[in-house]
Image (cartoon, helix red, strand yellow):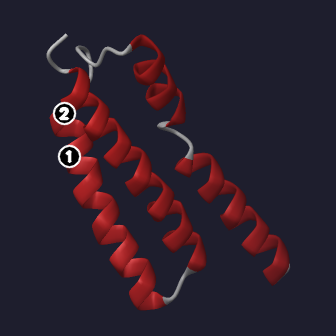
Amino acid sequence: MTDEQINILGLSAGAVTALTFLPQVIKTWKEKSAKDISLYMFLITFVNEIMWLVWGLLINNMVVILTNAVMLVMSGIMIGLKLKYNHK
């Protein structure tokens, strides 16, 4: 496998990983309900993504940086939605 193919594979895997929370974000937003969502899971994920992002920055790996930046945003959105809709 060439370096370019390896980079494409890494970026593709990163893109799929980065979008894993998107269906949950959309569902929660549409239904305006987060009663079955675990706040602690997303808090742990948020902290984890910060650590991965910092590590990616330290080693200057764009796949790690981009993947975890998007995951951080998705986790943050889910935390916000959980806090907003928790009362319902």
> Residue 10: which quarter of the image?
bottom right
Q: Secondary structure at mark 1?
A: helix
Q: Which residue is mark 1?
A: 43
Using residue 72 as the reference point, say whether residue 48 is left or right of it. left
Q: Is residue 33 above or below residue 45?
A: above
Q: Position of residue 34 (x, y in %)?
A: 28, 19
Using residue 70 as the reference point, say whether residue 42 is left or right of it. left
Q: Is residue 30 above or below residue 61?
A: above
Query: Which three-letter amino acid code belongs to the residue tagged 1?
Result: Leu
The residue nearer to you, when weighing 73 against 14, is 73
Mark 1–mark 2 CB contact (< 8 Å): yes
Residue 73, numbered circle? none
The quadrant of the rendering that contains the N terminus is bottom right
Whole-number angstrom distance, CA of label 1 to CA of label 2: 6 Å
Q: Position of residue 63 (x, y in %)?
A: 59, 71
Q: Which residue is mark 2?
A: 39
